[in-house]
Image (cartoon, rainbow, N blue to C red):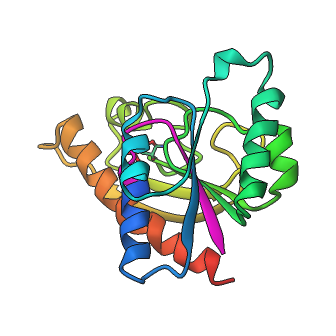
Amino acid sequence: KKIAVFASGNGSNFQAILDQIKLGAIDSEIGLLVCDKPQAGVVERAKSAEIPVFCFVPKEYETKADFEREILAALQEHQIDLVILAGYMRLIGSTLLEAYQNKIVNIHPSLLPAFPGKDAIGQAFEAGVKVTGVTVHFVDAGMDTGPIIAQEAIDITEEDTIEMVAEKIHQVEHSLYPKVIKELVSK
Ligand code: GRF
């Protein structure tokens, strides 16, 4: 199965997935990167790996459906089976949800349903929880809702700074997401 990664930022999860594909641990190929921020670090990562990139600027379109129709055309052109959201900072609309039913997954840096939305790591840290973690889930129309596929917890200790918590979360993401994708593409 061919996957597309949607990302808006640094792309450390994109890189972790790509690395596992290159190592042969995931039997798949990243056929496309979709990015809504042309300056994002993830674009350089894709280019240096010679992965096709579809970049767009959302405010150049009147509606979400307008840019999602172009994304959908790119996904179809590249024969994408599965969509992986990795730090894509917007809600998926009905155009893509209908075309890729149960074929869009997201990673979120908390144990959902706790701390959905932006800055989940900061939210958990401020709340003083002793356990947080990472969730991989199927995407529906809601914000970080949809059936949960996998979760992994980390502890927040007295000594931890928010940077240390973020580092632990990212390490878990980089191992958990490739593991889940490996399973999904083998089905
Ligand atoms: C990750 O923490 C992910 O859980 C969240 O956005 C971040 C993306 O980081 N949805 P990166 O761009 O993969 O480094």
On screen, residue 135 versus residue 142, left or right, reads left
* Up-down relation of residue 58 to residue 140 (above or below): above
Q: Can residue 133 be seen in this view?
A: no
* Up-down relation of residue 39 to residue 93 (above or below): above
What segment carries the magenta color?
1-13
Q: In which quarter of the image is the N terminus?
A: bottom right
Q: Reply yes or no: does residue 8 show up in magenta.
A: yes
Front residue of this view, candidates 174 and 63: 63
Horizontal and vertical percent position of residue 20: 39, 73
Q: Reply yes or no: does residue 47 show up in magenta.
A: no
On screen, residue 142 versus residue 18, left or right, reads right
Horizontal and vertical percent position of residue 114: 53, 43
* Up-down relation of residue 107 to residue 44 (above or below): below
Q: In which quarter of the image is the C terminus?
A: bottom right
> Which of the 4 image quarters holds residue 185?
bottom right
Q: Which residue is drawn at 42% across and 82% down?
A: 25
Q: Residue at x 63, y 43 (%)?
A: 144
Front residue of this view, candidates 96 and 38: 38
Q: Quarter for ligand 1?
A: top left
Q: Which residue is drawn at 44% across and 74% down?
A: 21
Extreme left residue here?
Answer: 159
> Which of the 4 image quarters holds residue 78?
bottom right
Q: Which residue is drawn at 36% across and 53% down?
A: 48
Horizontal and vertical percent position of residue 148: 64, 60
Front residue of this view, candidates 127 and 67: 67
> Which of the 4 image quarters holds residue 30?
bottom right
Horizontal and vertical percent position of residue 117: 55, 33
